[in-house]
Amino acid sequence: MKAYADFIELVKEYYDVSSVEMLLDWDQETYMPPEGVKDRSLQLATLSKVAHEMLTSDRMASLIKELGTAAVHDALTTEQQANVRRAEWEYHRAAAIPSSFVKEMAKKKSEAFHQWTKSRAKSDFASFAPYLFKLVEMKKQEAEYIGYEDRPYDALLDGYERGLKVSKLEPLFSELANGLSSMVGRIRDSGTEPDTSFITCGYPIEDQKKFCRRLTDFISFNYERGRMDEAPHPFTAGTLHDTRITVRYYPEDPRPAFFSALHEGGHALYEQGFIEEHYGTPMGQAVSLGIHESQSRLVENIIGRSLPFWKHWYPALADTFPKQLEGRSVEEWYAAVNDVRPSLIRVESDEVTYNLHIIIRFELEDAIFSGKLDPKDAPQAWDEHMEKYLGVKVPDSANGILQDIHWSQAYFGYFPTYTLGNLYSAQFYDTMKKDMPDMDQQLERGEFAPTLQWLRDNIHKKGGMYEAEELVEEVTGEPPSHEPFMAYLENKFGGLYGI
Amino acid sequence: MKAYADFIELVKEYYDVSSVEMLLDWDQETYMPPEGVKDRSLQLATLSKVAHEMLTSDRMASLIKELGTAAVHDALTTEQQANVRRAEWEYHRAAAIPSSFVKEMAKKKSEAFHQWTKSRAKSDFASFAPYLFKLVEMKKQEAEYIGYEDRPYDALLDGYERGLKVSKLEPLFSELANGLSSMVGRIRDSGTEPDTSFITCGYPIEDQKKFCRRLTDFISFNYERGRMDEAPHPFTAGTLHDTRITVRYYPEDPRPAFFSALHEGGHALYEQGFIEEHYGTPMGQAVSLGIHESQSRLVENIIGRSLPFWKHWYPALADTFPKQLEGRSVEEWYAAVNDVRPSLIRVESDEVTYNLHIIIRFELEDAIFSGKLDPKDAPQAWDEHMEKYLGVKVPDSANGILQDIHWSQAYFGYFPTYTLGNLYSAQFYDTMKKDMPDMDQQLERGEFAPTLQWLRDNIHKKGGMYEAEELVEEVTGEPPSHEPFMAYLENKFGGLYGI
């Protein structure tokens, strides 16, 4: 069909430009020289404008309209319909926003990011504040452009997880917060505290790198179609044949490296698992950030922090770091990588407290965008929330409100997808275990292929065929829920902490 | 003036996209995983189409027209006029070519490049031939689109060096070929042959890298605004605040590394020397490929292969490679890095024979584009020319017609600018020596700052103010000529070979 073929050509060109933006971001975080930020911010601003113009062109509008008419729509395959549906959603969000606003936003984001790195280094919120306020103001404007039923913040949530709303998150997060807080209390009261001295006594970075390479090879990250580099804030970027993960290394403690490698590796398996023929179309892309995160957290936590996984890997680890692990057992290692401890920094937090960090960010963002919280009072609100949910005192803004890159990038509404990812991952895992009752034994034997095949068949190959909630139901037979995740935590940490 | 401001905004957006294309090329040659070429070729094809559409938009056309009317034009500053003039030239070349042709060309180039790397590895011209023929055919078509007075090839030459024509190159190259052939003969007949055994006996690559870093620091390559990486075919890419050079390393012989670092460093000094306020406009860009090459060859050869330069650097070199250089003198090193020897590979050839390699390529390209040579007979013609000009027998196409990347990229008309760069560099050097009679003593004392300042003032800061021939006359008082270059060679190699 001519209209569909023309539509796909435009969609693919839009994808080309978007994927180049992603590569420029990757380069900025890995190899770009310090002063390159000036030129890069101009390049990114122009590309964002170009991409926006492509997506919202008159030609795109008329093709989407034509493909939406009943007769034409019915003649499309299910996959083609999915492509049209998802492109239409993106089109409507983009078409609501003027192109000049998009370019301006890209520039403001670059400036804010640049300032954030400086402000965080000095732990000085005041110097970052004007940039943050400007981004909030622009995002409020963006929400007005896009439109919403209940709350402005809903318009932003929808950009990362289609159809997500505060009214869906509030009950979910409230039950989750209760369950997690109770568990944190029980763990504290248990009096059990794993020994982590041997895991923070110095691990040469070169050896960490080699071990990360082995871990990523193990999960079948394809290096013919990807790379692994170093970045202060690990992320995954790329396309089907060129998926790039980044890892951060701390000289004293190998956990950040191993688990960022597995986390980003999980993201990368998703990207590398799309079907070739759908390249550049929604059918060859992730459902949502939440689903993407489910893939990274499943590999990082459910698999990567499990006892069967380390039963296979511990001997190799002890060979690589014989001095550090002398006289230690796999059980001690397993306990140390699952140390639950309320702390200041989200990305270093454990599986239990992690989602409390997210809930804090969600509550603050919701308050800011519903006008209940003035951004200038955000640092105080941050500290109060940290005290309330985690019982920790924030010593300075570098370890508090300035810790995350997201707000400097105007990613408001993004954080909740991390927790959704955790919830989805536990739901998928339940189904996986039903389908493969001997999954633990496989991992213990060093077999990852069946797990990957399950992910390929149930999630990766489906690309953008479903929305997030639909996919969860399609795969697990249940709508998204916090219960499987809480049950997973109870089971795991019940064992570890005897609670 | 509103029209000029609007024009500059478009010009800068075009520059943003073009500079991203350059970065994607850099990434492709340095860090991209092998299979990434599939996605990269799509990205580059789309960006080339986008850039072309930007340059040839109706809005650009009408602004250029408006800025060209006498009253408006006269109200512009000289610098503004230069921006308009150079953009107009680019516009006219681009507007002659359909956008679909540009995208198709980008795709064909990617495919041809991909095939070339494989064909060269197998030394198999036949497998590359269909790709080459297609590119030649398309370039002939492009020449017809653009138009020319005398020969189709002129339309291609003009793309790299504005106004360049076969009728200008023929007399220049013919005199040059005579002079060089005679010199090669005299050197051969001199019976003098430098000892190069100690320069090919193994130099650890890590030490080569550190020394390249010192050499590039010495010439003031700014690492806050640039990087140095490894690439099989060294090149320079980037923008004012992000200029990237690449170097190739051979484990046995450090010359390719040192002189590619200095060569690309010379290119980079030019890029890093443009004036900030002209960023993204022709005034903040190179005059032409020939002028660009004059900067690289001046640093690589005239300075970097000179005795004063090595009188300063040899002690540090001997410290770094004590075993390899034991009992050797700076004069022996100087002779070894200036070994004149007819050979098969252009990029490894010396200052005397280098331009004969270029003249061969020019003659073949001219013959192909004037229809006198069928591309299928090109390998035989290549071998005959190598025998005629250099007296060497070509053993296989990897060491012959398949050695250069250029034809796989459809860079027909590009090679002559290398020789123009050599000629310009010698002319600039003559003027430099007049302005700074103690330049040799400065270099011997390890002072590069005055040389760089001269280049900044006379060449770099002028950006795109002049055309190549104008700049040469402006700086040296003479039109481009082969004589200063020949005199430079006679002086240098007369001394080295006693001829």
Image (cartoon, coloured by chain):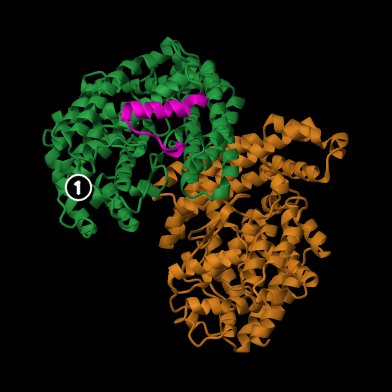
Chain colours: A orange, B green
Mark 1 residue type: Trp
Crowd class of label 1 (few under 14; some 14 to 19; many from 20; radius 10 Å)? many
Secondary structure of the magenta portion, mostly? helix
Position of A399 relative to A105 (above/below): below
Identify which residue, B311 or B21, lies in the foreground: B311
Q: Can the viewer see residue B246 in this picture?
A: yes
Q: Is residue B383 magenta?
A: yes
A431 horizontally vs A263: left or right:
right
In this view of the protein, can residue B463 be seen by the observer? no
Q: Which residue is mark 1?
A: B333
- Residue B19 screen position, x and y as percent: 47, 37
Q: Nearer the viewer, residue A40 or A237?
A: A237
* Chain under disc 1: B
> What is the x, y in percent for residue A473?
81, 61
Magenta stretch?
B375-399
Q: Secondary structure at mark 1?
A: helix
